[in-house]
Amino acid sequence: MSDAIIATIFQAVVDGNTRGALEGIERALEQGLTAEVILNQGLIAAMREVGRLFEAGEYFVPEMLVAARAMQAGLNRLRPLLVAQGIQPLGKVVLGTVKGDLHDIGKNLVGMMLEGAGFEVIDLGTDVSPEKFLTAVEEHQPHLLGMSALLTTTMSNMKLTLEALERAQVRERIRVMVGGAPVTETFARQIGADGYAPDASRAVALAKHLLQLS
């Protein structure tokens, strides 16, 4: 019975069926399944499948978004239970779109995919200055910092943020990954970032790689 309920949650998330996912989670909890089992076998496994479908060219950004929203709704339901169980996230990530850039769809999708993979995400939103990134790093002590830019004119603010981290002597404490339509692997290396991801699915793989989790 429990396997069938987990399979229902899994499929609901893959299909982007938020209501189905939440109903499945309630049934699973009533059956006595732990929040950790539901998270790992239902939500996280589903988001791995969504990432696979995206990389195979079977899913595109709209499908990823609705799946990620279904996952996030389920995660919101489970989060208090996970905290009560003392379940630790894989790592903590601060995310933001750089100063001068108001685009957030890609950044939001990366955040949801990271949450779906078991990371704790602090989303600073858009138009984030180097100073605000630095303040967040000092306050939250994250393992990772993720920066997004969709405009070529704002990409330089990624470099300015890295320089601010260097000046404050906190750069060595964290791994920095960058992404966004005009950003490239070459640019990431030039500014001294630790990694570049072309899409949300590969951002998860990169985050795990940078923290030596895979």
Image: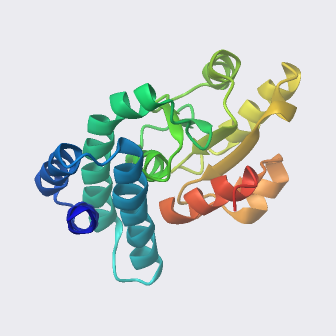
Q: Vertical placement of 38 versus 199: above or below?
A: above
Q: Position of residue 211 (x, y in %)?
A: 73, 49
Residue lying at 50% horizontally and 64% vertically, measured from the top left: 201
Q: Which is more toward the observer, 213 or 186?
A: 213
Specify the quadrant of the image occupied by residue 9.
bottom left
Instruction: Tell which of 121 and 12 is nearer to you.
Output: 12
Residue for point 51% across, 30% down: 86
Estimate the x, y position of residue 45 in percent, counting from the top left. Answer: 41, 64
Residue 169 in view, yes or no: yes
Quarter holding the C terminus is bottom right
Which x, y percent locates residue 97?
52, 38
Q: Quadrant of residue 88?
A: top right
**What is the total number of numbered labels drawn onto the structure image?**
0
- Residue 185: horizontal and vertical position, in percent? 73, 64
As rendered, which of 94 and 101 lies closer to the eye? 94
Which quarter of the figure is the N terminus placed in? bottom left
Q: Is residue 129 above or below residue 29?
A: above
Q: Quadrant of residue 171?
A: top right
Q: Would you say residue 154 is visible in this rendering? A: no
Coloured how?
rainbow
Q: Is residue 24 left or right of residue 147?
A: left
Question: Relative to 93, is 174 on the left or the right?
Answer: right
